């Protein structure tokens, strides 16, 4: 039973390039959450998606960041025109029902480095 | 607004000593979850507490949820080197929003 999968595990981009981070939820899970973690910091919520819907994007920066979770395929977090401050670990988590007591299972993360 | 504070930020203990981390929310929680993240790893779910005053145990780990559902603690008895990592609490609110604390980084001295 595969867990949450994220790729790539490490991504290096130059300033101004685009970064695409992929997340495949656990089998049977239709709710996906994206978090950002700066070094030695906690996890900061970015966005919560269900299939084809963005439920809560209150943690997403207004510009350059977007997320989608299409009917088929993984969820994608897209960062356009990356800047050095975007360097962080980006974790995706999935849950089965998205309910108030639902457990989130985390993927291994993508560590983005912007040169 | 909703805020989750976690203390201490760092804790160094001698192997075999006990360890406790505390979590406080500015407003009442629906539930609280605890995660452990090893260095270089990803958060791993430990437990969820839902009821007021709830206490749960997992071997040497004891989790408590306050009566007012605004605070929680994780206590580890007789720490071992395998306990090294950062322990996060995550408070979930009635609007489903989940807010993570900044974590307590546990370092074990041999």
Image (tube, coloured by chain):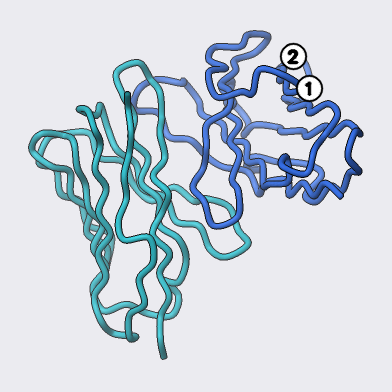
Q: From what the image shows, is residue A94 above or below residue A8?
A: above
Q: Colour of chain B?
A: cyan
Splitting the image into 4 quarters, where does residue A106 fall? top right
Disc 1 to disc 2: CB gap under 8 Å: yes
Crowd band around label 2 with a 10 angstrom C-alpha radius: few (<14), some (14–19), many (20+): some
Q: Which chain hosts label 2? A: A
Residue at the spot 39% in from the left edge and 45% down from the top edge: B101
Q: From what the image shows, is residue B49 above or below residue A38?
A: above
Please tell me whether mark 1 sits on a helix, a strand or a loop: loop
Query: Going by the image, does B61 lie left or right of A95?
Result: left
Q: Which corner quadrant holds the N terminus of chain B?
A: top left
Residue A55: image location, x then y, percent: 54, 12
Query: Going by the image, does B21 lie left or right of A7?
Result: left
Do dots 1 and 2 share one subunit? yes
Crowd band around label 1 with a 10 angstrom C-alpha radius: few (<14), some (14–19), many (20+): few
Residue B21: image location, x then y, percent: 28, 59
Residue at the spot 52% in from the left edge and 31% down from the top edge: A45
Residue A24: image location, x then y, percent: 71, 32
Foreground of the two, B6 or A62: A62
Please tell me whether mark 2 sits on a helix, a strand or a loop: loop
Residue B35: image location, x then y, percent: 42, 50
Residue A70 badge: 2
Q: Which chain hosts label 1? A: A
Q: Which corner quadrant holds the C terminus of chain B?
A: bottom left
Q: From what the image shows, is residue B48 above or below residue B82?
A: above
Residue tagged by mark 1? A73
Query: Going by the image, does A107 lie left or right of A65?
Result: left
Query: Could you give the CA–CA distance between mark 1 and mark 2, rounded to whole angstroms?
Result: 6 Å
Which chain is rendered blue in the image? A
Splitting the image into 4 quarters, where does residue B66 fall? top left
């Amino acid at each position: 039973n595969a867990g949450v999968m994220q790729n790539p595990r490490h991504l290096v981009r130059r300033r101004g390039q685009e970064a695409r981070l992929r997340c495949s939820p656990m089998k049977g899970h239709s709710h996906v959450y994206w978090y950002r973690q700066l070094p030695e910091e906690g996890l900061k919520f970015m966005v919560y998606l269900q299939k084809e819907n963005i439920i809560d994007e209150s943690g997403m920066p207004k510009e350059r960041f977007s997320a989608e979770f299409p009917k088929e395929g993984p969820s994608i977090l897209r960062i356009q025109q990356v800047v050095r401050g975007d360097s962080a670990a980006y974790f995706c988590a999935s849950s089965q029902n998205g309910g108030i007591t639902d457990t989130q299972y985390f993927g291994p993360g993508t560590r983005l480095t912007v040169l | 607004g909703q805020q989750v504070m976690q203390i201490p930020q760092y804790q160094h203990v001698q192997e075999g000593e006990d360890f406790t981390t505390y979590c406080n929310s500015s407003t009442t929680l629906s539930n609280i979850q605890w995660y452990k993240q090893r260095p270089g790893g990803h958060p791993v779910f430990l437990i969820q507490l839902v009821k007021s005053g709830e206490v749960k145990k997992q071997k040497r780990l004891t989790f408590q949820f306050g009566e007012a559902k605004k605070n929680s603690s994780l206590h580890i008895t007789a720490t071992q080197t395998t306990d090294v990592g950062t322990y996060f609490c995550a408070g979930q609110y009635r609007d489903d929003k989940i807010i993570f604390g900044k974590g307590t980084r546990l370092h074990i001295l041999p």
